[in-house]
Amino acid sequence: MIEFLYSIDVTIFFFFNHTIANPVLDVVFPFLTDLNKQLFVVWGIIIFILYLFIKGNANTRAMIVLLIITIIAADQLSSSLIKQFFERLRPCRALEGVRMLVPCGSGYSFPSSHAVNNFAGAVIITRFFQKQKIFWFSFASLIAVSRPYVGVHYPSDIIAGAIIGSITALCIFHLWKFINLSHRKLLSK
């Protein structure tokens, strides 16, 4: 059964990595997958977050703090615990004929930390700003789909990453709501 599921994973991987390959996506997906390595993007995000933190209301500031906590927690859960437990080789190390559009990476494959972090972020942001749901989940999905396209993750890596990131974010968000509600009750006594 596991070999059958793996064969499906490999087939879908090669669909993204070979079948839908085209010159436009060969430029777009490597750029998207490496946004976190683009200096102008990183500085732009830092400046924007600082601006929102200073100029935003209490709701916006709470979202920013929760977003930072959630992404750190989700990333550590993914990179330091789950990947080390499963030790799944990336397709670019395990399969022949993989089209590589970015470096393979030294870490393990399962789950995709890109998917974990982006879905965790999408959940937190949209808990505070519901109207932005389509944008943030579309963005997270594009980043996730870029990973098999560029050759560094299996589809199951990104599906698991989306689930792990979303669950982590929901747990942290509901814990924050519980603490916030408990704190308000204590103050009102």
Image (tube, grey):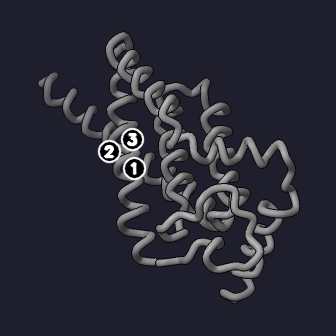
Q: Find disc 1 in the rendering and name its residue.
A: 171
Query: Residue 179, relative to residue 5: is it above or below?
Result: above
Q: Residue at x 58, y 64 (%)?
A: 104
Q: Find disc 3 in the rendering and name its residue.
A: 173
Binning the other alpha carbons within 10 Å of mark 3 as few (below 14), some (14 to 19) or many (20 upward) gives many
153 left or right, relative to 180: right
Secondary structure beneath dot 2 equals: helix
> Where residue 140 sits in the image (x, y, percent)?
61, 43
Q: Which label is found at residue 175?
A: 2
Task: Say whether marks 1 and 2 touch (CB < 8 Å).
Answer: yes
Q: Residue at x 65, y 42 (%)?
A: 31
Task: Say whether marks 1 and 3 touch (CB < 8 Å).
Answer: yes
105 left or right, relative to 52: right
Q: Tell me the quarter of the image containing the N terminus.
A: bottom right
Task: Say whether marks 2 and 3 touch (CB < 8 Å).
Answer: yes
Binning the other alpha carbons within 10 Å of mark 1 as few (below 14), some (14 to 19) or many (20 upward) gives few
Q: Residue at x 61, y 24 (%)?
A: 131
Q: Residue furthest top?
A: 55
